[in-house]
């Protein structure tokens, strides 16, 4: 049996703030079809996790974690879900808090987690040949795996889900966090700071990111958040693999959270919409298409463009709903829009998985004009629910959504290239034109119905990477 241990800070169904959790939850399941290997997953145990899961935890052991000159305790728990074994590391001081990120000491919390992951390898009855870390929270685990070699010949992979978040701290905490010689500082440091993401880029045997376009983009200063020299340096070991989604999990014909299940029938989508709008108090307008946004309300998602043109677009015969939480500026803006257009718009400023699914099921169009987008899962989920994505051509959005072309009849959505509000408005107006042209609209929906992004091909690409790293891994 060949073993791959995923290390991550979030994972469905246990704890989620964004697409990272979806990937860490669904990729191990997709890899199960390859018989001769076993993927397990190790996560922090957050107080925030639902009781439903906490009740299933089995205690394994407790051990000390050396954080520089300090000793911290870690407790290791496990549970099995859908035939995958999950490990959870708990520490009251670091993880018994509300929410999962956003604290002044997030850097320290995940340096602790990384140390604890490496230490836990002594105690679990499972020896990974590959340690696969996801995002900055696990960067130090990848670095320590390389420096300390806790398991002979263990290889490491690091996946960048978003290069914007790097886990940056002042360098003078080095002695507080590490009991290693100062010769290791250069691998962990970037721009005079301790940088968790850079540490992984320096130490990982292989680096992946979540779409081929993003793999190219992050070598460029516009997208690299300062790390392009590192990525150019490691370009031979960097590869982009597009994320898949769990197509059984996101399936409108069986999803229990939506009002009426459907395969592709628009009439049933309408039923969902009627029900949802009744529930949230937005009057239903049969002839007006529904445009939705479901996202973290942060600048990355192109919301400044939306702010520039939404008033103008709302003059058209449409309805608009946003679901999201995040920066106050955007929450305030959308609340104001809903207030000023009570017949046309609603703002649901919350994080609610069930509501998100009802919106995917109800909408005609899904809007995602991101400034940058490593992969993006929401547009893929929208396609699953037969909702037409409107995106900016960047990262994974560019790799998955192809603009509708009236001449050839190809394309599964709408897109625009420049980060420009009026280009967005033009494409929104164009989408409305196509919506109001029955033959074009039917052709577009046919294409949308055929678009599927399951894990099948991407899981295979990961297997190829695992095999290249550890040739003794032989897959069934
Ligand atoms: P990111 O990882 O940058 O947040 P993705 O598109 O990759 O963006 O993934 C976002 C995931 O989070 C999707 O599953 C989306 O449906 C979900 N999501 C985003 N905002 C909300 C919300 N307010 N309520 C419920 N689910 C949300």
Image: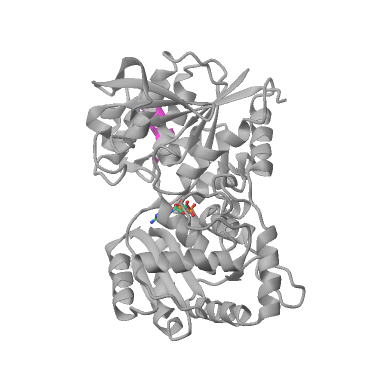
Q: Position of residue 181 (x, y in %)?
A: 36, 23
**Residue 337 at least partly seen:** yes
Q: Nearer the viewer, residue 241 or 379?
A: 379
Specify the principal SS of the magenta part. helix
* Numbered disc total: 0
Q: Nearer the viewer, residue 166 or 43?
A: 43
Name which residue lies at 47% across and 77% down.
421
Residue 442 vertical placement versus 325 (above, below):
below
Q: Is residue 86 above or below residue 343?
A: above
Where residue 329 sits in the image (x, y, percent)?
A: 29, 67
Foreground residue, 338 or 269?
Answer: 269
Q: Position of residue 309 (x, y in %)?
A: 43, 79
Residue 337 quadrant:
bottom left
- Residue furthest to the right in view is 408
Queried whether the magenta region covers residue 226, the answer comes back as no
Q: Which contiguous range is marked in magenta? A: 182-189
Which quarter of the figure is the C terminus placed in? Answer: top right
State whether residue 221 is above or below residue 96.
Answer: below
Residue 388 seen from this side:
no
Tell me the quarter of the image containing the N terminus: top right
Q: Residue at x 41, y 39 (%)?
A: 10
Residue 268, percent from left and from top: 56, 64
Lateral position of residue 175 relative to residue 30, left or right: left
How has the structure been colored for display? one colour
Displayed quadrant of residue 2: top right
């Amino acid at each position: 049996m060949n073993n791959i241990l995923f290390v991550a800070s979030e994972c469905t169904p246990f704890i989620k703030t964004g697409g990272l959790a979806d990937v860490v939850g669904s990729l191990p399941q997709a890899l199960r079809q390859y018989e001769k290997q076993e993927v397990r997953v190790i996560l922090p145990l957050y107080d925030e996790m639902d009781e439903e899961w906490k009740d299933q935890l089995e205690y394994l052991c407790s051990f000390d974690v050396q954080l520089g000159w300090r000793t911290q305790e870690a407790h290791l728990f496990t549970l099995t879900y859908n035939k995958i074994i999950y490990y959870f590391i708990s520490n009251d001081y670091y993880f018994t808090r509300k929410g999962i990120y956003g604290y002044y000491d997030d850097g320290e919390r995940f340096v602790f987690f990384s140390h604890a992951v490496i230490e836990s390898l002594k105690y679990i009855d499972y020896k990974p040949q590959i340690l696969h870390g996801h995002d900055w929270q696990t960067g130090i685990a990848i670095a320590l795996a390389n420096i300390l070699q806790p398991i002979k010949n263990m290889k490491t992979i690091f996946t960048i889900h978003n290069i914007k978040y790097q886990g940056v701290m002042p360098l003078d905490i080095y002695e507080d966090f590490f009991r290693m010689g100062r010769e290791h500082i250069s691998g962990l440091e970037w721009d005079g700071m301790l940088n968790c993401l850079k540490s992984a880029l320096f130490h990982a045997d292989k680096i992946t990111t979540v779409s081929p376009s993003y793999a190219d983009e992050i070598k460029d200063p516009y997208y690299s958040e300062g790390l392009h020299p590192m990525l150019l340096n490691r370009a031979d070991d960097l590869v982009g693999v597009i994320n898949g989604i769990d197509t059984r999990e996101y399936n409108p014909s069986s999803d229990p959270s939506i009002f009426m299940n459907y395969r592709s029938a628009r009439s049933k989508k309408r039923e969902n919409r009627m029900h949802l709008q009744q529930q949230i108090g937005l009057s239903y307008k049969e002839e007006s298409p529904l445009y939705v946004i479901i996202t973290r309300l942060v600048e990355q998602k192109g919301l400044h463009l939306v702010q520039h043109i939404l008033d103008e677009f709302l003059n058209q015969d449409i309805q608009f709903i946003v679901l999201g939480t995040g920066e106050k500026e955007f929450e305030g803006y959308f609340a104001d829009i809903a207030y000023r257009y009570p017949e046309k718009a609603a703002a649901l400023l919350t994080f609610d998985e069930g509501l998100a699914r009802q919106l995917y099921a109800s909408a005609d169009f899904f809007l995602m004009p991101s400034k940058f987008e490593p992969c993006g899962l929401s547009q893929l989920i929208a396609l699953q629910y037969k909702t037409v994505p409107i995106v900016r051509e960047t990262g994974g959005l560019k790799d998955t959504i192809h603009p509708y072309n009236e001449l050839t009849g190809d394309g599964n959505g709408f897109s625009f290239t420049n980060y420009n509000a009026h280009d967005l408005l033009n494409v929104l107006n164009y989408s409305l034109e196509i919506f109001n042209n029955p033959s074009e609209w039917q052709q577009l929906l046919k294409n949308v119905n055929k678009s599927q992004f399951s894990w099948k091909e991407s899981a295979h690409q990961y297997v190829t990477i695992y095999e290249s790293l550890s040739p003794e891994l032989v897959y069934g």
